């Protein structure tokens, strides 16, 4: 039954992605706020369908920490789920992502309409400059910026040391960092097709004020909070691993 439910969800996700990509092209002439309002409905629709087909829902703790001002979000990366759920939890946003994703048919069209910070990871230090310049522009325009500082989806129980780019952007821009932890990887695995029923726990942490901190200090605070939060959510120690 689990495979049937997961198949129904996947089919719906693909079909609606195509439909919303075509819709994204139609709303291109409108403002970012209008485009986001329309395109983000795809994520919310799929979260509803996930709950209906796979009996997988989520609960959020710590919403009182969400600031009124535009923020940089450091989110745990373990699944596809968080890319959907953050659109239902937080204000209008865009993402730091690898440029290649914009070339994906249909899906990439919708991403492009939301003005992501698309960087060329192969360009080394130039990618950092791109991230800071484009990220500051995004934040100054009032769009929240989602960063997955681990850089890749990690298996449950492990956390990769954070990359430098997000913390450098926070230092240079002065915008606060909002850390978010969750255990979605235990229900929607990073390389798995089958979705397990249950309740995904999301924990929103206290804001990290970046105005008086260096990038290394911002990362240190965010990592310490994330390791602790993940251990509390899962009931198991979270292992911090070095970047390769």
Image: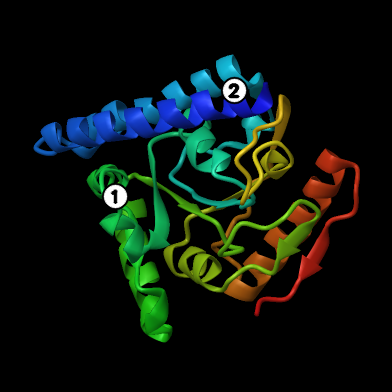
Using residue 105 as the reference point, say whether residue 242 is left or right of it. Answer: right
- The answer to whether residue 40 shows anywhere in this view is no
Q: Residue furthest left?
A: 29
Q: Is residue 14 above or below residue 174?
A: above
Mark 1 and mark 2 lie on one chain; the one further toward the N terminus is: 2
Disc 2: which residue? 5
Q: Is residue 209 above or below residue 128?
A: above
Could you tell me residue 86's position as x and y percent?
Answer: 51, 37
Q: Is residue 237 above or below residue 218?
A: above
Q: How many marks?
A: 2
Local packing at callout 2 (Cα closer than 10 Å; few below 14, some 14-19, many 20+) is some
Identify the secondary structure beneath mark 1: helix
- The answer to whether residue 70 shows anywhere in this view is yes
Residue 183 or 50: which is nearer the viewer?
A: 50
| Comparing labels 1 and 2, the label whose residue is closer to the camera | 2
Local packing at callout 1 (Cα closer than 10 Å; few below 14, some 14-19, many 20+) is some
Residue 63 or 40: which is nearer the viewer?
A: 40
Could you tell me residue 192's position as x and y percent?
Answer: 63, 45
Could you tell me residue 68's position as x and y percent?
Answer: 48, 36
Image disc number at residue 108: 1
- Kindly identify the residue that appears in the image at 29 percent across and 56 percent down: 102
Please state, as top left, top right, bottom left or bottom right, where the N terminus lies in the image: top right
- Kindly identify the residue that appears in the image at 73 percent across and 76 percent down: 242
- Kindly identify the residue that appears in the image at 50 percent across and 23 percent down: 8
Residue 13 or 168: which is nearer the viewer?
A: 13
Identify the secondary structure beneath mark 2: helix
Q: Quarter of the image holding residue 100?
A: bottom left
Using residue 170 as the reference point, say whether residue 77 is left or right of it. Answer: right
Image disc number at residue 208: none
Q: Between marks 1 and 2, how big is the CA–CA gap? A: 26 Å
């Amino acid at each position: 039954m689990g495979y049937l439910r997961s198949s129904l969800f996947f089919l719906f996700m693909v079909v609606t992605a195509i439909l919303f990509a075509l819709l994204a092209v139609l709303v291109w002439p409108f403002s970012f706020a209008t485009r986001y309002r329309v395109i983000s409905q795809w994520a919310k629709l799929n979260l509803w369908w996930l709950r209906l087909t796979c009996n997988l829902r989520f609960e959020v703790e710590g919403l009182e920490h969400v600031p009124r001002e535009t923020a940089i979000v450091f989110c745990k990366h373990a699944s596809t789920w968080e890319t959907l759920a953050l659109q239902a939890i937080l204000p209008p946003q865009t993402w730091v992502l690898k440029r290649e994703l914009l070339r994906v048919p249909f899906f990439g069209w919708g991403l492009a309409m939301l003005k992501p910070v698309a960087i060329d990871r192969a360009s080394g230090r130039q990618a950092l400059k791109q991230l800071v310049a484009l990220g500051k522009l995004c934040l100054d325009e009032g769009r929240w910026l989602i960063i997955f500082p681990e850089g890749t989806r990690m298996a449950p129980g492990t956390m990769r040391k954070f990359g430098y780019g997000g913390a450098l952007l926070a230092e240079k821009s002065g915008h606060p960092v909002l850390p978010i932890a969750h255990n979605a990887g235990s229900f929607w695995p990073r390389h798995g097709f089958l979705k397990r029923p249950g309740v995904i726990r999301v924990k929103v942490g206290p804001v990290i004020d970046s105005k008086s901190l260096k990038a290394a200090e911002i990362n240190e605070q965010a990592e310490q909070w994330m390791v602790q939060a993940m251990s509390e959510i899962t009931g198991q120690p979270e292992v911090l691993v070095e970047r390769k």
